[in-house]
Amino acid sequence: MQRQPGITRVDESPAAALYQAHAPIILTYLRRHTPSREDAEDLLLEVFLAAFEGGRVERLPEGERIAWLRQVARHKLADHYRRTNQRLTAGLEDAVEIASDDEAMIPEQVALQHEEEQRLHDAISRLPDHQQLIVRLRFAEGMSSAQIANALNKNEGAVRMALSRALNLLRSLYGEY
């Protein structure tokens, strides 16, 4: 089959590669936090639409893409619950479906994901304590710079600078592994 010049197949695009590489992990996260598979799939679509909008995620280094996608997924999930004013609940039938979704993940993917998470954890543990705290508050707790500044009784600009320095140091520490 001959291809016309200037037309690329969808499965060869960077967007398709990004989706194929990270969608299963993001979907599993969303599935664990939504009452139905349909809600999780809708949110997954929103996450990747945000990623493809303006090509933001494509400009990130490969190692930062999954972190960015996870953060967007958390925000989309929070927006979803704000809109629907629902609580995080799952019935017994949903729990069986969630468990079967996890079994679909290739064991190698799970192992690689755990290795990367351990590398990141090790790199974070090498940061100074105050930088660890700011990184944890920003990314694990999802707090904004203004919220962190308020919680730590610091200037927002100082928190932003500390976060920037922490992330730069974290990149270099993460690269050493």
Image: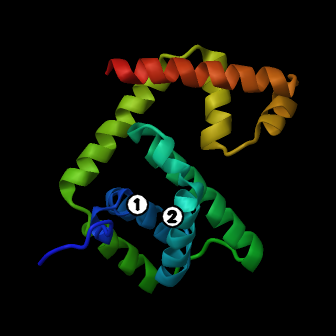
Q: Which residue is mark 1?
A: 15
106 on left or right of 24: left
| Residue 28 at x, y percent in the picture | 41, 65
Q: Crowding near pointer 1: few (<14 within 10 Å), some, many (20+)?
A: some
Residue 33, located in which quarter of the rendered image?
bottom right
Q: Residue furthest top?
A: 128
114 left or right of 54 in image? left
- Specify the amino acid type for callout 1: Ala
Circle on res. 6: none
Tell me: 39 left or right of 160: left
Q: Where in the figure is residue 164, as x and y percent of width and height?
A: 65, 24
- Tell me the colour scheme of the image: rainbow
Number of the label disc, if any, that sits on residue 48: 2
Q: Nearer the viewer, mark 1 or mark 2?
A: 1
Between 58 and 164, the one nearer to me in the picture: 58
Vertical position of residue 165 compared to residue 11: above or below: above
Crowding at dot 2, Cα within 10 Å, few <14 / some 14-19 / many 20+, comes out as many
Q: Amino acid at mark 2?
A: Phe
Label 1, label 2: how many angstroms apart (C-alpha)?
Answer: 9 Å
Label 2 near label 1: C-beta < 8 Å? yes
User: Could you say whether the residue bearing mark 2 is in a helix, strand or loop?
Assistant: helix
Would residue 134 be seen by someone viewing this image from the given angle?
yes
> Residue 139 in the image: x percent, y percent?
61, 40
Q: Looking at the rendering, in which quadrant would you find the N terminus?
A: bottom left
Vertical comparison of 121 with 47: above or below:
above
- Looking at the image, is mark 1 or mark 2 earlier in the sequence? 1
Judge whether residue 85 can be spotted in this image. no
Quarter-of-image position of residue 54: bottom right
Q: Residue furthest left?
A: 1
Residue 26 in picture, x, y percent from top left: 45, 61
| Local secondary structure at mark 1 | helix
Seen at 32% across and 62% down, the residue is 20
